[in-house]
Image: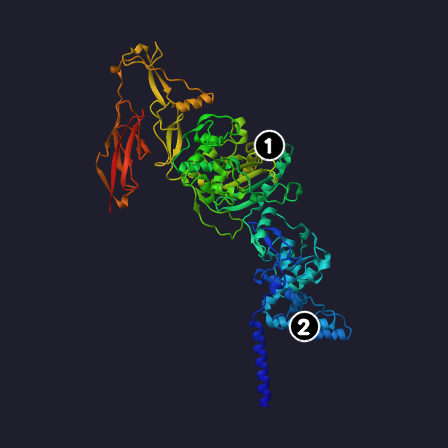
Amino acid sequence: MTRRVRFAGLLLLTCVALLIGLRIAPHRALAVYAPSSTAVYSSEGRLMRLTLASDEQYRLWTPLPAMPQQLVDALLLHEDQYYDWHPGVNPVALSRATFNALIGGGHAGASTVTMQLARRLYHLQTRSVAGKFKQIAASIWLSARYSKRDILEAHLNLLPYGGNVQGIGAASLIYFDKQPSQLTLAESLALVVIPQSPKSRTPRGAEPDALLAARLRLLDRWSRNRAIDGGTLRMARAPLTFSDSAALPFIAPHLTDMLLAGGADRTSIHTTTSIPLQRLLERSVTRYVAANRSRGILNASAMLVDLRNLEVKAVVGSARYADASIAGQVNGTLAKRSPGSTLKPFIYALAMDQGFIQPRTMLKDAPVAFGPYSPENFDGTFVGPIAAQDALIGSRNIPAVALAARLSQPSFYQFLKSAGVSRMAGERHYGLALALGGGELTMEELATLYAALGEGGTLRRLRYTRDAPAGPAIPILSPESSFMVLDILSHNPRPGELEEGSSTGRAVAWKTGTSWGFRDAWSAGIVGSYVLVVWVGNFDGSGNPSFVGLKAAAPLFFMLADAIDSTAPSPPAPGFAIPLNVRRVEVCAASGDLPNADCPQRVATWYVPGRSPIRVSSIHRRVRIDTRTGRQACPDTPAAFAQEEVFEYWPSDILALYAKAGMPRRPPPAAGNCSSTQAMSTAKPSITSPLAGATYEIHARQMGTEPLTLVANADGAVQTLYWFVDSGFIGTSTPSAPLAWAPSRAGAFNLSVVDDRGVSDSRALQVGLVP
């Protein structure tokens, strides 16, 4: 007897060890037996697209904890009440079914959840006795290898829901457009009973009678032992409405194509796309192209980016995705195209950073050759001297090329490379033509550049998905130049305003571009806290005279800008905030320099102290005229014959530009016949503080905050003094009045003061550092 007990115990231990070994031995997860679809979601959590799995099924593997408990409980109540207690096969139910079959008592269901899973996993034919034995053996094997939770999860993910729909995850999205965790009690019960008879219970819109009856029977069983309030019970009894698998959403196809190509092994992709904004862009692009078909406008692309987090909110790759005649499935936002003049704002920003210009600096718009390269303006004309801000708004080519030629460390080419523009040839390949769109970049790259402009010169990569890393923040421009360029672009008139002279809507900082040969029309800019870029053209690169940025792309841009502002109003972009180091100063309108006493027209502009080039204007001079001769009056000319007038004294090259532009200036009067002893003297200003030859000591902790007092005397006719440190303008004062200036470093400085007649004084200044 003892030996039998020992043998039995040993056998039992062996079986237990075998079972434990089977459970802990490495084995594949059940999910690998069934390939999964990929679901793409919007930023609101709505389904945008559901792909077929590799076996042509809609199946979205969903973890058991993500399913509602009421659905799991209802399924076990309906199919396998003793699931937690049997080893994969219910011997009582199996014996009862066998007995009924032997005596001809009809069919009685004995399949457990595990047996149903075994049949589906191993594709078993279970109508024969041999097939049933295989199913039983496979169920016991599954129970030995996998936990109850693993088996239940796999069963719920392989349930048939009609056609090629399998599993709770796919069925919930397809029929109810919601995640399983959001299912109501009625919806959960419906998904429990459909798999028992998919052919008769599969819904197509309205709930079939067979499905409603089966669901209500299960609801009666469910409610017998559970406390359900009357309202919930009434809602659970109401007929349901289902969506159809044939009407699955197909939103933002170009974007989802791109994301699926890069993440095919993922079961879910959570994008940053906003469905309302996506629909808005799609409708607007479609309507615009349809309305302008007579002009040969057949295709367009658009992209919208949220500046606050660099999330791509909408992508329209082409006007019609399914239209093969325009290669509609091509994603235009990723195609390399010539950007035309859309890159000019970055040339001006770099020129500001490198100290060449401020918004009112006068530039030359005249015929010029840069070696063998002779750029021309789009309209074939020249306007002569022009303020930098007007040259940018007017998209004048020659000033932009001239500025690009002066850039270094970085050059414009180096700037684009550092900003991540891909597949660029060598710098010599482009030359200065790069300033006018001689290179190529994608809409995505252009949007990234404008986003950097809107973020104070900091470049970060765009984010298409919620889990995409933010990436490094790379400063490519200063906050000051970014702000000043955006301020200029915000004064760029809308297309309708150019003729009507009226302003509508909110301010938008924007720029157009037209590529050589009229192949591409662009408009890009910042609308509130969004970056918006649109393109009009043909994917085959064919040109069309209608493809002009201002005429073809700008109207679509503002159609979208106005619609976005009314649909999703947002605060201004961060780049519109005035940086701490930017100052407002009054300059002479004609020269862009600080006004002297005789400047007749003054305007305000932005500048960066110590960086922006700014000096006292010497263009306007007050001259006494001898009315008898028309010449300059001498000191002894009688007052009755002397008259004062202000004349412009331009350099000869500028006078020549005005003449070529058809705007000749009035020449100053000739000198009078005065004797040399009558020459007039001009008293220059005199710096009285700081003292000459002195060294000023400043404590290290107070550097940048402890001011020095700057004072100068001047002629009695002088009203304004302009102060400079190392050629950088720092402020204004009146004669004998102090100006406070706090050095930011120790060392030698050159201090100078210029009065409003252009006469100056200077001295060396030494600042020492006290630890």
Disc tally is 2
Inspect this view and state whether residue 19 appears: yes
SS label for mark 1: loop
> Can you name the residue that lies furthest to the right here?
104
- Where residue 308 appears, x then y in whole percent? 48, 45
Tell me: 613 left or right of 548.
Answer: left
Q: Is residue 73 above or below residue 500?
A: below
Tell me: 193 left or right of 456.
Answer: right
Which amino acid, mark 1? Ser
Q: Which residue is mark 1?
A: 546
- Where residue 165 appears, x then y in whole percent? 67, 57
Q: Is residue 11 above or below residue 217?
A: below
Mark 2 Cα-neighbour bin, 10 Å: few <14, some 14–19, many ≥20: many
Which amino acid, mark 2? Ile
The circle drawn on residue 136 is 2
Q: Identify the image quadrant of the N terminus.
A: bottom right
What colour scheme does the image use? rainbow
Inspect this view and state whether residue 571 appears: no
Q: Is residue 428 above or below residue 4?
A: above
Residues under numbered marks 1 and 2 in contact, where contact means CB atoms less than 8 Å apart: no
Q: Is residue 63 above or below residue 613?
A: below
- Where residue 758 appears, x then y in whole percent? 31, 25
Disc 1 or 2, which lies upstream in sequence? Answer: 2
Q: CA distance from mark 1 to mark 2?
A: 73 Å
